[in-house]
Amino acid sequence: RVRLRKVPDPIDAPEEVEYEMGTITSWKMVEVVSQDGQTNAGNGDESNGDAGAATVAPAKTIPIWRLDIDNGGEAELTSYEVVEGISRFLMWRTQYAGYSEENYDLKQYRNSMGRFCGKAADAPHASTPAFFARLMIKKEQDLYPPLKNRLYENNWGGKSGERNAWIASVKEYAHDMETLRNGLLTLEDVFFGFCGGFAALEGVEGMAPAVSDERSARDLLEDDKLRFEIELESFGQYAKSGLWNSPNTRKIFKEIVASCKNVGTLALCLDLLCRNTKAYLDATQPKTTTRKAAASSSAVFDQPDLYWGSSRRS
C-alpha cells in the first residue's frame, strides 16, 4: 500500500496538498530519456581492440512502478516515490509520533456548510469573503435569541450597541480577511460569555491541570501526544460545562482563526462554533413538566323551560 502526496497547483497554491491511497500492481523497465528526447544510448569513440569497431554504450533503464489509485485512475512512480509512499502510509496508519499531513484534516472534515444550497447564480461566489460575512451574521441571528434567554444581564444586544456595531463592521468591511477573522473571534468571545465561560469546570475531577495550564496554543500543538488527543468539538457531558470542553481547546481554536488565510478555514471554524453552541443549548435546555388536570364532571344546572308566548302553560 502506498500513500501518495500531490500538489495540484505548485505555483499558485503550493500549500494545498492532496493525499491518495493506492496499491502497487506491476512494474516495468523504462529507458531514460534526456531533455532533447534522445535516450542515453550513444556511440562510443573508442575502438574495440583490433576490430576497430565503435562500441555502443548500453541504454540506461530504470524501474517504473504502476499504482492503482483507490479513487480511480493509475499513476507511474519511480522507486524513490514508491519507498516514500510506503513510509508515509506506515506512519499515517500507525500515527507515528511527529508525523502530520498538511490540510488532511481540513479536507476530510464533514461540515454542514460544505455544500452550497442557495441560488444557482450565487454558487460561483459562495466562497468569497462577502458571502461568508453574510453567513456569519445569519448564524449570529439564529443563535442569539435562545442564548439571551439564559442570562439575566445582556451587554451584547443591550443599550451598549456592541451588536449593532459588530454587524455594521462585518457588512461594511466584508472584503477584508482581517475584519472577518476579528469578527469571528468577537463572536466566539460573545458566545463563550453566554455559555458561562469555564465556571462549570472549576472543581471537576481531572480538569485541574488543563485549567491551570499556561502554555500558548503553539506550545500545545508542538506536543505530539496532546495534538492527537485534543478534541475541539464539545459533546456528551462536556457540552453542559460550556462552549469548550477545556481552556486548551479554546486556545487552539483562537490560534487557528487568527492564523488562517482562506475563507474555507474560517467557514469550518464558524461551523464548529455553531455546533458547540447548539450542543450547549440542547444539553442545558430546561425541562418543562405538564400537569394532568383531573377529570372533572361538568355541573348540571336546572334550566327553566323557555316558552315563546305571552303566558306559560301549567
Image (tube, rainbow, N blue to C red):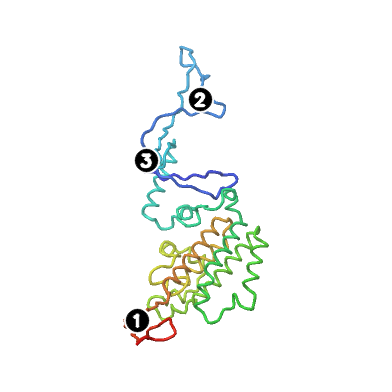
Look at the numbered disc 3 and give the secondary structure of its residue. Answer: strand
* Residue wearing tag 3: 23
Name the residue located 55 percent from the left edge and 50 percent from the top edge: 15
Disc 1 secondary structure class: loop
Residue 38 or residue 178, whichever sits in front: 178
Residue marked by disc 2: 39
In front of the other: 76 or 202: 202
Residue 25's place in the image compared with 127, above or below, is above
Give the residue at x 39% y 55%.
96
Q: Nearer the viewer, mark 2 or mark 1?
A: 1
- For mark 1, does the 10 Å Cα neighbourhood hold few (<14), some (14 to 19), or many (20 or more) residues? few
Looking at the image, the residue that sits furthest to the right is: 172
Label pair 2/1, CB-CB below 8 angstroms: no
Instruction: Give the mark toward the camera: 3 or 1.
Output: 1
Expressed as whole percent of the image width and height from the top left, the position of residue 155 reads: 59, 78
The span from disc 2 to disc 1 (Cα, nearest Å) is 96 Å
Q: Is residue 105 above or below residue 241?
A: above
Crowding at label 2, few (<14), some or many (≥20) Cα neighbours within 10 Å? some
Residue 159 point in image, percent of width and height: 64, 78
Name which of mark 3 and mark 1 comes first in the sequence.
3
Q: CA separation, marks 3 and 1?
A: 69 Å
What amino acid does circle 3 point to?
Answer: Thr
Q: Is residue 139 left or right of residue 305?
A: right
Q: Amino acid at mark 2?
A: Thr
- Residue that carries the numbered disc 1 in the rendered image: 293
Sequence-wise, the earlier of marks 2 and 1 is 2
Query: Mark 3 touching mark 1, by CB under 8 A?
Result: no
Q: Nearer the viewer, residue 48 or 20?
A: 20
Q: Nearer the viewer, mark 2 or mark 3?
A: 3
